[in-house]
Every structure is written in structure tokens, then in C-alpha cells.
Image (tube, rainbow, N blue to C red):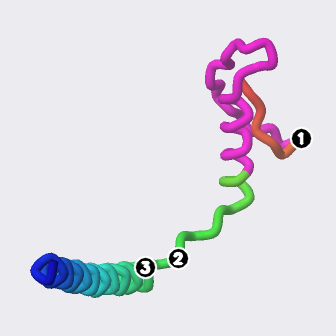
Amino acid sequence: MAQNLATLREIVQQLTAGQDQTAREIAKVESAVMEILMKMPEPPQPTAVTALISTAAVSIAHPTSDGDSIAPATLRYSPRSAAPRPA
């Protein structure tokens, strides 16, 4: 029984050492990720036109209420409504 306890203690020590090593490696990876994120420039803010086009593209791509898909349409700018309309 004493030998079993000694073996168990050794296994626990090995597990603890492995967990400590894993924690150090995770900390290194997190640090590297933070460095990379800090070096990356901020993405440009979308302009009103970009947001409008994105909204129009999403609304065109959604299926109709009866389940039929709407094929993507060519958008054309209409100065009267200031919104793209399907061609």
C-alpha cells in the first residue's frame, strides 16, 4: 500500500508539472495574440454608401415569404430616392 501511495504521489506531481507547463504556454500564446492585435490597424469605418449597399444586397438575397429565392439583381442608383433599386 505504501508503494501505491508513492506511485500516486509521483503521478500527481507529474500532472501538476504538466499543468504548470501548459499554463505557461497558454500565457505565451495569449501574449503573442495581444501583440499581434495591437499591431493591427483599426478597420476603416464604413461610409453611408457602403452601409446602404450592404443593406440592399442583404435584402435582395433573402428569400420571399413564399420560399422562392430572389436572384441577385443589378443595383442602379436613383437620385430621387437616394437608395439603390433593382434594375
Range shown magenta: 52-79
Q: Amino acid under label 2?
A: Glu
Circle 2 — which element? loop
- Can residue 61 be seen in the rendering of this structure? yes
Foreground residue among 11 and 4: 4
Q: Are marks 3 and 2 in contact (CB under 8 Å)?
A: no
Quarter location, residue 39: bottom left
Q: Earlier in the sequence, mark 1 or mark 2?
A: 2
Q: Position of residue 57 (x, y in %)?
A: 67, 37
Q: Position of residue 58 (x, y in %)?
A: 68, 38
> Is 25 rendered above or below residue 43?
below
Task: Give the residue pinned by disc 3.
Answer: 37
Quarter the C terminus occupies: top right
Would you say 45 lies left or right of 52 here?
Answer: left
Task: Give the residue pinned by disc 1.
Answer: 80
Is disc 1 surrounded by few (<14), some (14 to 19) or many (20+) residues within 10 Å?
A: few
Quarter the N terminus occupies: bottom left
Name, please, the residue furthest toward the right. Answer: 80
Alpha carbon distance from label 1 to label 3: 43 Å
Task: Give the residue pinned by disc 2.
Answer: 42
Would you say 5 lies left or right of 55 here?
Answer: left
Q: Amino acid under label 1?
A: Arg
Foreground residue among 59 and 8: 8
- Can residue 32 be seen in the rendering of this structure? no
- Mark 3 vs mark 2, foreground winner is 3
